[in-house]
Amino acid sequence: MSLKDLSKTSMNKSKRIFSGVQPSGDLHIGNYLGAIKNFVSLQKEYECFFCVVDLHAITVWQDPQQLAHKTREVTAAFIASGIDSDKNVLFSQSQVPQHAQLAWIFSCVARMGWLNRMTQFKDKAGKDKENVSVGLFSYPTLMAADILVYLATHVPVGEDQKQHLELTRDIAQKFNNDFKTDLFPVPEPLIFGEGARVMSLRDGTKKMSKSDSSDYSRIMLNDTADEIVQKIRKAKTDPHTLPANMKEAYKRPEAFNLLSIFASFNNKSTEDVVEQYAGKEFSSFKKDLADVIVDKIDPIGKEMQKLIDDKPYLDGIMKKGKEKAIYVADSVLSKVYDVVGFSKT
Ligand code: TYM
């Protein structure tokens, strides 16, 4: 997509996607199944902005030596998974200052009570509420700015981001009401089926996460085929054979998680997979599961590594993306400034 094409669509509210991924650790199959795999399908139908959200990453400490490298890694994952860097806008958040500018305005629109209800903040802050960064608390207002500075109408994410998107919708509506405008669309979350909530391989009641201390809890996009096989072999199960039906599967979180992961990689429903493996041994199912993960992830990991080794190529893509992103974000922000009443002198 050229700047000229963007100029035609920059204020067109029909179908535009924004989504973001943090460069805060190695990407895992939860990020892939819950988000990136869907970005790849959606690019056919929507105009897409995919962003590496480094401003969000620094709400918890990031090693400055590592951050730029991690940002390139996420960009490489987007491209290696099949996102077309010519047709979509790929960029890093910190390079488009309009995100932070709109976030400030939104922090004056959002209410303390709304942010106080965010469960992800409560989970991340835990008992250490007094000691976490202010940014971790106001994180969702920056998310709202990410989305709305492009007037995005749709946001593909995993289930864990649902509450943040509800807040984005509240902010868009309150801004429109307060300033008597229809500038912002009220964006729709796109949360898809089986991969929307991938759980830890060590504990089927806990989300698979970059921050889990155990490497065996997740499969990374850059794991080797051997590592994937090992991790699936060691994945926690229970002493029974595979569940006979969905009712039983729901009661067995580790089995349910593995069956859902298998379903998602094969674009099937968990119900069909439960039926396929009902009463079978975990050992044979785990072999099939490892095979399908290796099939899909191993080529992505290898392609990621090639791209990471070609730093000028990745940096060129990010630079082009940044220019396109600024072009759209600046025109929206300037409208916001008019609506809010900021003086131009
Ligand atoms: P992040 O970086 O934690 O995760 C990136 C995407 O991966 C999804 N995801 C999962 N999906 C299924 N199962 C899991 N275990 C799993 N873990 C992560 C996330 O839902 C997400 O879609 N706040 C966001 C980043 C962000 C953003 C945005 C997203 C910033 N601004 C604007 C959408 C729109 C986050 O921390 O994602």
Image (cartoon, helix red, strand yellow):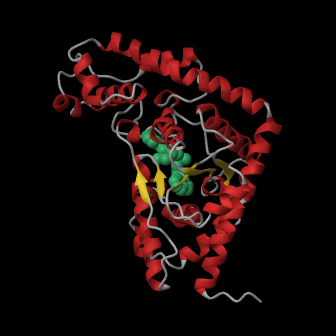
Residue 121 horizontal/vertical position (percent): 46, 59
Residue 304 horizontal/vertical position (percent): 67, 30
Q: Nearer the viewer, residue 281 or 342?
A: 342
Q: Nearer the viewer, residue 127 or 12?
A: 12
Whether residue 256 is situated above or below residue 230 in the rendered picture: below
Q: Residue at x 66, y 58 (%)?
A: 6
Q: Residue at x 21, y 33 (%)?
A: 251
Whether residue 47 is situated above or below residue 312 in the rendered picture: below
Identify the residue at the far right of this view. Answer: 312
Residue 253 horizontal/vertical position (percent): 29, 32
Whether residue 30 is situated above or below residue 143 in the rendered picture: above
Q: Nearer the viewer, residue 88 or 336?
A: 88
Q: Residue at x 73, y 26 (%)?
A: 306
Q: Residue at x 68, y 62 (%)?
A: 7
Which corner quadrant of the image does residue 338 belong to? bottom right
* Viewer can see residue 325: yes
Whether residue 173 is situated above or below residue 274 in the rendered picture: below
* Viewer can see residue 242: no
Residue 88 horizontal/vertical position (percent): 63, 47
Horizontal side of 307 relative to 206 (left or right) equals right
